[in-house]
Amino acid sequence: MEPLIYIINASSRKDTGITDDLARSLLWLRGPNLPRIECVTLEDGPNGISTARDSDDAAPAVLRFVEREAQKSEVGAFVIACFSDPGVHSARELTRKPIIGIGEAGIMAALSFGDRVGTIGVSKSSPAANERFTRRLGVQERVAGHLAIALDYGQLKDEGVVTDRLIEAGRRLRDEYAANVLVFAGAGMGRYVKAVQTAVSLPVVDPTQVAAGLAIAQFMQLHQYCVERFDAHNRS
């Protein structure tokens, strides 16, 4: 059976089109000999995730999904496509299959591109929440700052408005916070990477693409290892 990697939108809200945006942003990871990528919306998740309470509410839905789907042999990995990484650590206790949170993956990838990371969120969040997250990762000294474009769900459908706000936030993080690499602190934002990186002249990381790339890389390493073992056995 074809191997499968799940990309999980932990929110049940469908009118934002986030799950479709996730799928479009990962088209480059589809091809022969690669595992199938399936982007899913959790029907029992909260109606949007913008606060710590929302993230806490999303965790049980994530865990139920992982616990059920991890039993299937074709499932190779799970990517939790929410920057606050709801349920990631508990999910890792349910299965040995890789569980990758886009928040952790995005921040760690950004540290490979620069010394001071600036994060750009979609929804307005408290500075304390962002400080807690980076402190938990042990990287708070290398995070320059966080800005949110604070658009409502209706405005998020206007690509021009979103692009302008992201560029404005990126320039502020560069000029006022001395950030030298940027991370989108949200899911489904891959289509804005090129425009923001061009306008701000800093590396821009889309965390979902990074997390999915890690999942694919892990799968390919394990697959190649099995092939090498099989060939070695046949030669002996």
Image (cartoon, rainbow, N blue to C red):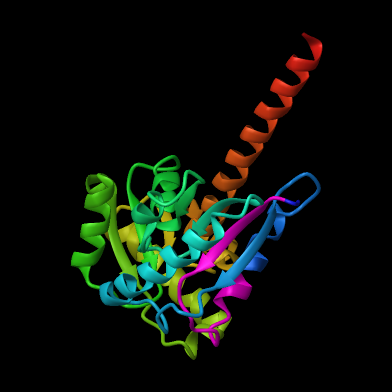
Residue at point 44%, 66% (across, down): 64
Q: Is residue 123 above or below residue 181?
A: below
Q: Is residue 127 above or below residue 212?
A: below
Residue with the most extreme bottom position: 154
Relative to 131, 34 lies left or right = right
Please give the range of residues in magenta: 3-21
Residue with the most extreme left position: 128
Q: Position of residue 43 (x, y in %)?
A: 51, 80
Residue 39 magenta: no
- Closest to the observer, 98 or 209: 98
Residue 206 in view in this figure: no
Residue at point 27%, 59% (across, down): 145
Q: Position of residue 194 (x, y in %)?
A: 59, 61
Residue 14 in view in this figure: yes
Q: Quadrant of the rendered structure where residue 174 is?
A: bottom left
Q: Position of residue 236 (x, y in %)?
A: 77, 8
Residue with the most extreme top position: 236
Residue 18 magenta: yes
Q: Position of residue 110 (x, y in %)?
A: 43, 47
Q: Is residue 220 above or below residue 99?
A: above
Residue at point 41%, 87% (across, down): 152
Q: Is residue 151 above or below residue 146?
A: below
Q: How many marks?
A: 0
Residue at point 32%, 77% (across, down): 54
